[in-house]
Image: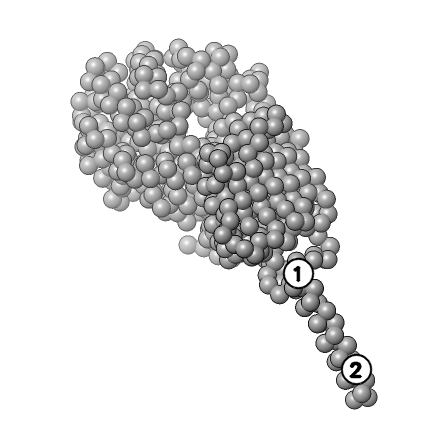
């Protein structure tokens, strides 16, 4: 008996020795790999072709990038940083680690199959991961896909050190829409630079490419304008509910713009006018056109304020504001608001929008406005953002303008999920997680063809939210669905399939410390907080 135990022990040692010897070389992955097509990627790529083996990501993986193509090295470094945050692995970028025996290569390619600036191909084999993209922007989108296919947990039974097996295959991808935006209202409640950066981190992971900042409203003016300092000194001093408010200095704004640019996200600044201008009129009463003495306002009514559309001073003021903000904004757009100007006479409103469009163009930007701006005779280069009245959106397309789709009853992140929601409004609808996803932007406005649709945007108005946790409650998980509506082709979208992939975002959201709303419609993989915990006060 004792002898047979000894023999068995020897045999085990012998096998262990062989395994150890094998492990001196490249660890061979022998377990059944997962299927690349089963990995829960959001937004779903155009084409995924699994090849049923795996790339072992470990400390002997090196990242290499095209060295002369602009921005590729930075994208490689971004990937290294994100891999470090997820796995603790410190991968070298373009050399420096002698031990490398598997590579991730981020390559610049002008192949005609990479038609758009954001298109990419991702090839994963057992010993290399290759990204092909025409531009650094395409490479950056590819890197988000790669981040999503790296498993959250390593497989520690295979090798002496941790290894993250990435299922192999080929991904060919290209966005469905050019403009994939989220909007944050920093005027009703102010959000810090740090909060905005966290939102940018999360939006970038889901391939958003625009963050629209609603910088001014009745309750607050949030961006420093050097030639009109009282805008922020006075107009930035409060917010909904009467708390202190706040504003971005021009340096803060530039910091946000640069941070967004590193994530290939364009900032769209909005100065809402001629309505929603109470804060500006309190700072400079000469701008006011509603015949009353403006007072700081901390409530949530809309539609009571207006600039005076018939005063030259108003237009020189706007010229200064558009000039200063445009100088700090590399993106092509300037949003003039234009919504709910209920106390502006129609003829004044039209005059105003037409004059402001010229100012925006003079400063080299393309005008965007909420759908009411189509009452004016706007140029075909200007863009209408549909939010409420379909007739306005349809008229804009007839006029030759492009449209951004943000229908309130489908795409407003500030709408409550249901009657039990802690934050949010419900004037347009209750928008549970399924309803937010189940609609078709491509055919949403009757008679408007796809070439008139620039993209979609999900606005988050902040009357009822004042900190990042509350922001996350309303934005997540719904904003993730809008990323798929904007990026993925209609044929690739299905709620049944999406909800399974969404459930598997929980470990990522938890790791990013996102207090998302754990909707009961989703069978969450594993969640730091239960529905009951999130719902209690
Ligand atoms: C309508 S949407 C507004 C905003 C409010 C929002 C609340 C739009 C262009 N105007 O001023 O914050 O509803 O949901």
Tell whether 236 sits left or right of 530.
left
The residue that appears at 19% across and 36% down in the rendered structure is 233
The residue that appears at 65% across and 49% down in the rendered structure is 127
The residue that appears at 79% across and 82% down in the rendered structure is 7
Whether disc 2's CB lies below 8 Å from ligand 1 is answered: no
Q: Position of residue 366 (x, y in %)?
A: 39, 20
Q: Position of residue 226 (x, y in %)?
A: 21, 31
Q: Position of residue 13 (x, y in %)?
A: 72, 76
What mark, if any, has residue 522 been given in the picture? none
Kind of element beneath mark 2:
helix
CA neighbours of label 1 inside 10 A, class few (<14), some (14 to 19), many (20+): few
The residue that appears at 63% across and 29% down in the rendered structure is 490
Determine whether 129 is above or below 212 in the image. below
Q: 372 and 150: which one is in front?
A: 150
Q: 308 and 526: which one is in front?
A: 526
Which quarter of the picture shows residue 153? bottom right
Q: 218 and 486: which one is in front?
A: 486
Read off the residue under disc 1.
25
Read off the residue under disc 2.
7
């Amino acid at each position: 008996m004792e002898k047979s135990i000894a023999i068995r022990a020897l045999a085990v040692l012998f096998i262990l020795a062989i395994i150890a010897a094998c492990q001196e070389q490249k660890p061979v992955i022998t377990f059944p790999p997962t299927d690349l097509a089963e990995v829960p990627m959001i937004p779903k790529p155009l084409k995924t072709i699994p090849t049923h083996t795996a790339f072992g990501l470990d400390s002997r993986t090196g990242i290499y990038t095209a060295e002369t193509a602009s921005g590729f090295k930075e994208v490689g470094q971004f990937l290294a940083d994100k891999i470090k945050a997820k796995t603790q692995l410190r991968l070298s970028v373009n050399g420096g680690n002698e031990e490398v025996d598997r590579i991730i290569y981020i390559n610049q390619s002008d192949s005609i199959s990479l038609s758009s600036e954001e298109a990419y191909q991702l090839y994963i084999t057992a010993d290399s991961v290759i990204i092909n993209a025409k531009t650094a922007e395409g490479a950056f989108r590819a890197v988000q896909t790669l981040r999503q296919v790296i498993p959250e947990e390593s497989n520690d039974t295979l090798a002496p050190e941790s290894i993250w097996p990435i299922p192999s295959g080929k991904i060919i991808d290209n966005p469905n829409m050019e403009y994939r935006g989220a909007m944050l209202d920093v005027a009703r409640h102010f959000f810090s630079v740090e909060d905005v950066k966290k939102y940018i981190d999360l939006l970038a992971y889901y391939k958003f490419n625009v963050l629209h900042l609603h910088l001014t409203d009745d309750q607050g003016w949030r961006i420093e304008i050097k030639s009109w300092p009282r805008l922020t000194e006075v107009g930035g001093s409060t917010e909904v509910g009467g708390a202190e408010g706040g504003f971005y200095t021009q340096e803060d704004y530039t910091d946000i713009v640069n941070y967004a640019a590193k994530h290939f996200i364009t900032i769209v600044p909005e100065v809402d006018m001629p309505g929603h201008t109470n804060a500006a009129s309190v700072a400079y009463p000469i701008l006011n056109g509603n015949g009353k003495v403006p007072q700081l306002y901390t409530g949530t009514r809309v539609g009571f304020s207006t600039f005076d559309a018939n005063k030259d001073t108003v237009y020189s003021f706007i010229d200064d504001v558009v000039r200063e903000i445009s100088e700090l904004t590399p993106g092509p757009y300037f949003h003039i608001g234009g919504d709910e100007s209920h106390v502006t006479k129609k003829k004044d409103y039209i005059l105003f929008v037409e004059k402001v469009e010229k100012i925006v163009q003079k400063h080299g930007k393309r005008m965007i406005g909420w759908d009411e701006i189509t009452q004016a005779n706007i140029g075909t280069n200007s863009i209408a953002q549909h939010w409420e009245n379909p007739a306005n959106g349809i008229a804009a397309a007839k006029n030759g303008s492009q449209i951004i789709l943000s229908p309130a009853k489908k795409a407003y992140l500030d709408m409550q999920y249901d009657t039990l929601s802690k934050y949010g409004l419900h004037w347009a609808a209750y928008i549970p997680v399924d309803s937010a996803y189940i609609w078709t932007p491509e055919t949403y406005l009757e008679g408007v063809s796809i070439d008139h649709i620039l993209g979609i945007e999900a606005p988050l108005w902040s009357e009822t939210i004042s900190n990042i946790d509350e922001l996350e409650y309303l934005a997540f998980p719904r904003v993730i669905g809008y990323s798929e509506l904007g990026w993925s082709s209609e044929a690739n979208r299905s709620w049944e399939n999406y909800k399974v992939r969404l459930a598997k975002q929980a470990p990522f959201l938890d790791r990013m410390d996102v207090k998302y709303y754990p909707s009961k419609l989703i069978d969450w993989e594993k969640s730091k907080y239960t529905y009951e915990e999130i719902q209690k006060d």
